[in-house]
Amino acid sequence: MPQLNLTVALALLGVAVLLGLGLHGWWSARRSGPRRAAVPMPPGERVEPTLGGPAAGAVLREGPALRVPATRRPARLDALIDVIVPLTLEAPVSGEIAIAHLPPSRRAGTKPMHIEGLDSETGDWEVPVHGRTYGEFQAGVQLANRSGALNEIEYSEFVQKVQTFAEGVNAMPDFPDMLEVVARARELDSFASPLDAQLALVLRAHSVAWSVGYLTQCAARHGFVPGALPGRLVLPGSDEGAPPVLVLSFDAQAALADDPQGPQAAVREVTLSLDVPQTAEAAEPFPTWHRMVTELADDMDAIPVDDQGTPVTLHAYDAIGRELGTMYRALEARDLAAGTPAARRLFS
């Protein structure tokens, strides 16, 4: 019996050693692999706020509740950033006729264009709709955006499209001189280009990589939601339909990996960006950006660096803040304050 007990004891010891080696190997592999979310993130709709608002019927998540956004009108023509062409009618035109003759494309080159009608009953300018009658029309094309100033070729395309519409509704357009329009477009572009501030910092993993699930879970604790594109998480604005205040972007291939917790979904750095002209100064987008850099870095054990890989100092944040103050004042002086519809269209 003593010999039997010794054999059993040795066998149990061998099992314990093997189990210990197995656990050690598993722990080592887990430490070297990407950080994973504590609980798998449930699949959900990718909804990213945009200037024109979400698509009709889209559902936005707001805590545990769901809400259906109201329909939003597109931005109206604005003499600050558009060249506007009046179209005088011989007689009122129905919405059905106007819609039938609208150009198939609402762009002239890289510039958005719009045609609006003056509702005979309400007196409001609006995009033509069925069941309404219009006593006047006006067409407009944006003078500048992030693609540059409106050029001669784009203005000629706009004129051609408006002329075709005018013939369809029996209207007489009054086109401004091309040279004057192009000169105005270049002046606006020269003003806007130095004020087009887009801030971005990279959060780089200090030790192990993050899984997409872990990254999404950490960002969600700070108010970020999935964006419309893979590899984008956004911090929504306070107003319905407003652009996101911040965008947290990372490798789209990792975002599309079959297993959001697996090695193919490992991420070592993310970019936190702020498109300054898109959000009103009163909403404090820059302080929010600065705070999120600090909080996310602490939460994910990351190092904030610039595009050269250099760690960002408090002095750099102070300098950026002063420059942004100057930019905000310049935009306000031109009646193009950050966050206004005109500013959002100009810097797009």
Image: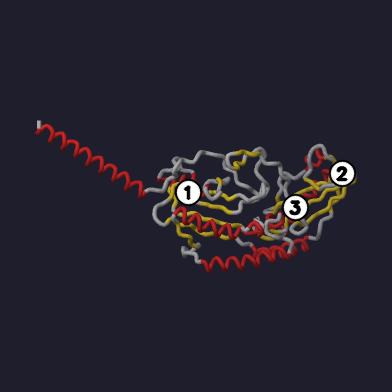
Q: Secondary structure at mark 2?
A: loop
Residue linked to disc 3: 158
Q: Quadrant of the C terminus?
A: bottom right
Mark 3 and mark 2: Cα distance apart in space: 26 Å
Q: Secondary structure at mark 3?
A: helix
- Position of residue 241 measured from the top left corner of the image (x, y, whole percent): 66, 47
Q: Which residue is mark 1?
A: 215
**Mark 2 Cα shell of 10 Å, populated few (<14), some (14-19), many (≥20):** some
Q: Secondary structure at mark 1?
A: helix
Is residue 318 visible in this depiction of the protein?
yes
Q: Along the polypeptide, which appears first: circle 1 or circle 3?
A: 3
Comes first in the chain, label 3 or label 2: 2
Name the residue located 82 percent from the left edge and 56 percent from the top edge.
175
> In the displayed structure, would residue 291 be above or below residue 216?
below
Residue contact at pointers 3 and 2, CB within 8 angstroms: no
At a point 77% along the width and 45% down the height, the residue shown is: 127
Of all residues shown, which one is farthest toward the top?
1
Q: Earlier in the sequence, mark 1 or mark 2?
A: 2
Q: Specify the quadrant of the image occupied by residue 288.
A: bottom right
Q: Position of residue 309 (x, y in %)?
A: 46, 63
Asked if residue 175 lies left or right of residue 197, the reply is: right
Name the front one of labels 1 and 2.
1
Label 1 or label 3, whichever lies nearer to me, is: 1
Q: Position of residue 223 (x, y in %)?
A: 56, 49
Residue 237 marker: none
Measure the C-alpha gap from mark 1 to mark 3: 45 Å
Q: Which residue is mark 2?
A: 120
**Callout 3, which amino acid?**
Phe
Residue in front for this viewpoint, 5 or 243: 5
Give the image quarter of residue 321.
bottom right
Mark 1 residue type: Leu
